[in-house]
Image: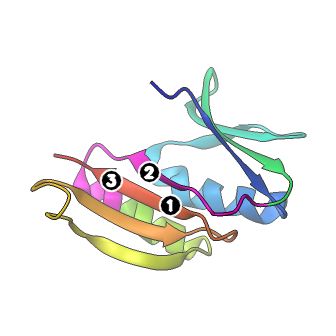
Amino acid sequence: MIDHLELSTPDLATATAFYQGALAPLGYALHVQGKANGFGAEPARLDFWLRPGEASSPRPHFAFFCATRTLVDASYRAALQAGGTDNGAPKLRVDIHPTYYAAFVRDPDGHNVEFVCQS
């Protein structure tokens, strides 16, 4: 089981602003701000971190769990409004499995961010 994910970004302020907007529909908030910025659905459970540094290459692909398809749609819209770039509008991805509903955006550093509901 994965406990947390940390990304390096050359522009911590821009990346932090993007993820504050993109993750808001999922109940995520910025709870720790300093040398690294930590996000989570609750202050005691920070599972997404940003730290200053060179963006990794190749850029990783990662997905945020969404309990409903409506949350996939809302997160996708929020990510675009926060400065993300479309990389695949919300839809069923039956090539993965019959109930795999997902959307993809590129964050300001080019990471492929997925929002997914698998039911």
Q: Tell me the residue that label 3 is attached to.
A: 116
Q: Tell me the residue that label 2 is attached to.
A: 63
Hey, what amino acid is under mark 2?
Ala
Residue at the front extreme of this rendering: 58
Name the spot of residue 65 as percent of width and height, x first: 37, 44
* Badge 2 vs badge 1, beta-carbon distance below 8 Å: yes
Distance, label 3 to label 2, CA atoms, is: 7 Å
Q: Which mark is residue 113?
A: 1
Q: Is residue 11 visible?
A: yes
Distance, label 2 to label 1, CA atoms, is: 6 Å
SS at mark 3 in the image: strand
Q: Earlier in the sequence, mark 2 or mark 1?
A: 2
- Mark 2, other Cα within 10 Å: few <14 / some 14–19 / many ≥20: some
* Badge 3 vs badge 2, beta-carbon distance below 8 Å: yes
SS at mark 2 in the image: strand
* Badge 1 vs badge 3, beta-carbon distance below 8 Å: no
